[in-house]
Image (cartoon, grey):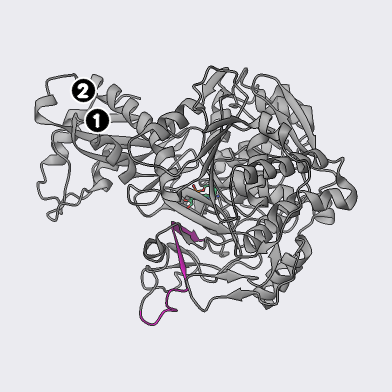
Amino acid sequence: MSENIDSLQHESRRFAPSAEFAASAQATPELYIQASADPEAFWAAQARELLHWHKDFTRGLDWTNAPFAKWFEDGQLNVAYNCLDRHVEAGHGDRVAIFWEGENGDSRAITYAELTSEVKRAANVLIGLGVKAGDRVAIYLPMIPEAVIAMLAVARIGAVHSVIFGGFSADSIRSRVDDASAKLVITADGGWRKGKISPLKPTVDAALAKTGTHTVQNVLVVLRGGNDIDWVDGRDSWWHEQLEAAEPEHTAEAFGAEHPLFILYTSGTTGKPKGILHTSGGYLTQCAFTHKYVFDLDAEKDVYWCTAAVGWVTGHSYVVYGPLANGATQVLYEGTPETPHPGRWWEIIEKYRVSLFYTAPTAIRSFMKIGRQIPDRFDLSSLRLLGSVGEPINPEAWIWYREVIGAGKTPIVDTWWQTETGAIMVSALPGVTTTKPGSAQVALPGISIAVLNDRAEHVGHGNGGLLVVTKPWPAMLRGIWGDPERFIETYWEKFDIPGAESRRMYFAGDGARLDEDGDIWLMGRVDDVMNVSGHRLSTAEIESALVSHPMVAEAAVVGAADEATGQAVVAFVILRADQEDAQTPDEASTILRAHVSEQIGAIARPRQVFVVSELPKTRSGKIMRRLLRDVAEGRTIGDTTTLADTSVMQIISDKLTGGVRK
Ligand code: WT7
């Protein structure tokens, strides 16, 4: 991305909603007015309007034990019932919930009635395996309908799912299973990816075979890949056999609004991933609200498609809970965008007449790179709204998205949020907001966002600072699994300063600027967290994977700007003295890139590994990542005066000149 934030702000193109779109849009300017008058009452009204409550609530927000929030606490609901049964009972049983497209060309259309009955059977299977309300179930599946069914079945019986992205390694699975003390793992033999079967169960087997005791009693295996797998008698069983044998009926029981719904692990500034905890009523309210108004959903007419995998929060909120709570019809696709040909996504949009499409800037940029001749071959005229999420979308990509994919007429919603926020927080509202390419724009109705300096003062229009959520919101995280102290430290202490409202403001970790109109421009992370292809990775986590290799003495990782992925992982390593002559730097780099991939998953594999003899450190021993980032991005090295040894950077950059491999 070539633009810096100052030039971005001078982006002068404006796209006002068309009169036609505005006339039938779900969102209206009144939403902002209603919400600002009384945000709590606004959310309570949304909760009642958008969801079915087995027992109504009498309280909105309880913030007395801040920062541990409770929303609608004395209300009761069943999340799966809200996503399934009630639509069938309302006469929409024949509506397609999921148009599933396998990468290999398989497809399945699943109605709400069918999805409901599969989830009921799956719920009975879980109960049969001894899973009880509150128990944790790990899910490691490809993008197949069973992933959605498994999540909803877990939710239906009040258990807690921890979905693990299918690209993560055995070590990553094991640490997540252990942290959550999961009782059951649901996986598949394998799934289709890039034209071949990518095995999953062997990775789960390897995770559970690692030394030390674990809490997993059973592994439930979906048959998808047909690949050979090992079997542990007494532990493993086939999903399809269990479902076939299960009772078909299951009545959804109501749980409290604050009953835990899921844990989702995300990277932080330390090596240990954080288990972000979300609960039921507030989360589902904000998912349903945002899905309806940000995507302008008409559940009877639209075909919606969010390309995110269920293993990320976008898959939780905008593949599973938001769309299904709203009774939407959606596409679910198993594979990669370029398989078997680079027009695969556009072919799917044409096939299902997709009208609302939600994807990530990294994907848009990779399509831009191969050129418009690919999407131009398909009929994309069904599209009427496009969304973006995961990282800042540069104006060039924004314009390309609108012109080439949206035929120059679709509104674009750039949605800012996080695993922790649970649902969209900042976005244009289609039909209402005049959009600016590159800006996520304004807080949604009912959400309070500010850009503050270190002293918790508003920076004011035209200035940059830290993005802060100043009031609790319904889908907010309720904690970090098993670590309340880390929860407080990470998000609530930054602005816990004398004179400011104590522990009441949420620090998101992002830098942002307000333009002259007060619109928000995201500037990326301000901590040691990278954003690679819209996914968060921590420098510390990758550094600890690197130093776990016997060859490595020390490692420093930075995120460097990358045209395709937004940021790319770049590592600097010092080899152990006895290793220095054992292999060439190129060999070391190959070995270490593969090692990180094995330890964490392919997503974390460094783009480059540089073997160096020193790392730039301050006198107190802190690695100066800023300087390494300069090297990684090919810039002149910045101020080195605080370095303990100022010659280090010269040595590093001399050594790397010409040695930079892409
Ligand atoms: C981080 C959260 C939200 C689901 C996907 C990522 C960055 C996210 C935007 C956006 C600029 C964005 C932020 C945020 N981010 N959306 N529209 N514009 N930056 O979820 O893994 O929890 O990452 O992604 O840096 O903090 P996540």
Q: Please state the horizontal and vertical placement of residue 429, each as a whole percent of the image.
A: 69, 56
Residue 610 is marked as 1
Residue 54 is marked as none
Is 512 a magenta residue?
yes
- Tell me the SS state at disc 2: helix
Q: Please state the horizontal and vertical placement of residue 464, each as a whole percent of the image.
A: 43, 62
Q: Please state the horizontal and vertical placement of residue 460, each as a whole percent of the image.
A: 48, 70
Residue 659 or residue 69, whichever sits in front: 69
Residue drawn 62% across the image and 36% down it = 400
Name the quadrant containing residue 49: bottom right
| Magenta range | 498-514
Residue drawn 17% across the image and 49% down it = 640
Residue drawn 76% across the image and 60% down it = 50
User: Residue extending furthest bottom?
Assistant: 499
Q: Inspect this view and state whether residue 410 appears.
A: yes
Residue 434 or residue 560, whichever sits in front: 560
- Horizontally, residue 6 falls left or right of residue 416, namely left
- Give above or below for 195 relative to 604: above
Could you tell which of marks 1 and 2 lies nearer the N-terminus?
2
Q: Residues within 10 Å of mark 2 (few under 14, many from 20)?
A: some
Name the quadrant containing residue 311: top right
Please report contact status of discs 1 and 2: CB closer than 8 Å, yes or no: yes
Amino acid on which disc 2 is placed: Pro
Q: Residues within 10 Å of mark 1 (few under 14, many from 20)?
A: many
Circle 2 residue: 585
- Horizontally, residue 369 falls left or right of residue 96, namely left
- Give above or below for 379 relative to 123: above
- Tell me the SS state at disc 1: strand
- Give above or below for 330 relative to 522: above
